[in-house]
Image (tube, rainbow, N blue to C red):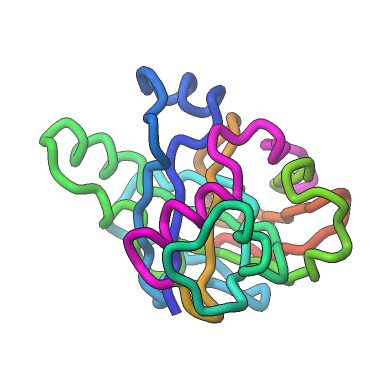
Amino acid sequence: MKIIAVGMNYALHNKELGHGQPSQEPVIFMKPDSAILKDGKPFFIPDFSDEIHYETELVVRINRLGKNIAPRFASRYYDAVTVGIDFTARDLQRKFREQGYPWELCKSFDSSAAIGTFVPIERYKDIQNLNFGLEIDGREVQRGCTADMLFKVDDIIAYVSRFMTLKIGDLLFTGTPAGVGPVSIGQHLQGYLEGEKLLDFYVR
């Protein structure tokens, strides 16, 4: 199982982080399977960063083997979605970018890919019109809609499948909207998709 993630997929988020013109193609990075955090287990802030940020995202679960998938067939290759958090060591990310180095380490550390309960895609009329958000200690801190994606889910799947074979159980993190911010010990994080709570855990 692999975790494929999309960076800079919402214009307002790009603006808040000071990114320039959007890429002409999806920005893709990977997380290892050891990054998965699920079943409501707590997230422990690592000792190598002083600035861990939450990035709330729609997560798509791949259910078929696929390579060189045409966009018009991409919807056949996923069966469920949930809310996830792409935890990011923002201080390390800035350092790596300034040095011109790859920045996987700031994204791919253990437990950096929190995922909630998966919901069958059939429950939703349109994957490109789903509202999702995050509450911390009962206060909404981030909200987005998949309609605002720069690159749509099916197009991302088609693009990625040109380079690597998608396998059953692979996960696709589709990018975060504006509103990212730091987490701290003791906070209670709850993620929602179309008003339904799918993600619920504490920061330790």
Q: Residue at x 42, y 41 (%)?
A: 26
- Decide if residue 135 is in sight here: no
When the figure is inspected, residue 185 is found, relative to residue 101, above or below; the finding is: below
- Quadrant hosting residue 201: bottom right
Q: Nearer the viewer, residue 81 or 43?
A: 81
Q: Residue at x 51, y 36 (%)?
A: 9
Q: How many marks?
A: 0
Position of 161 with respect to 94 (left or right) is right
Q: Position of residue 63 (x, y in %)?
A: 62, 77
When the figure is inspected, residue 48 is found, relative to residue 14, above or below; the finding is: below
Position of 152 with respect to 107 (left or right) is right
Q: Position of residue 127 (x, y in %)?
A: 75, 50
Q: Residue at x 60, y 50 (%)?
A: 153
Q: Position of residue 6 (x, y in %)?
A: 45, 48
Magenta stretch containing residue 30, yes or no?
Answer: no
- Quadrant hosting residue 60: bottom right
Q: Position of residue 62 (x, y in %)?
A: 58, 71
Q: Nearer the viewer, residue 3 or 142?
A: 3
When the figure is inspected, residue 174 is found, relative to residue 204, above or below; the finding is: above
Magenta range is 137-165
**Image quadrant for the N terminus?**
bottom left
Position of 170 with respect to 148 (left or right) is left
- Decide if residue 121 is in sight here: yes
Magenta stretch containing residue 157, yes or no?
Answer: yes
Q: Nearer the viewer, residue 22 or 47?
A: 22
Q: Residue at x 60, y 43 (%)?
A: 152
- Quadrant hosting residue 94: top left
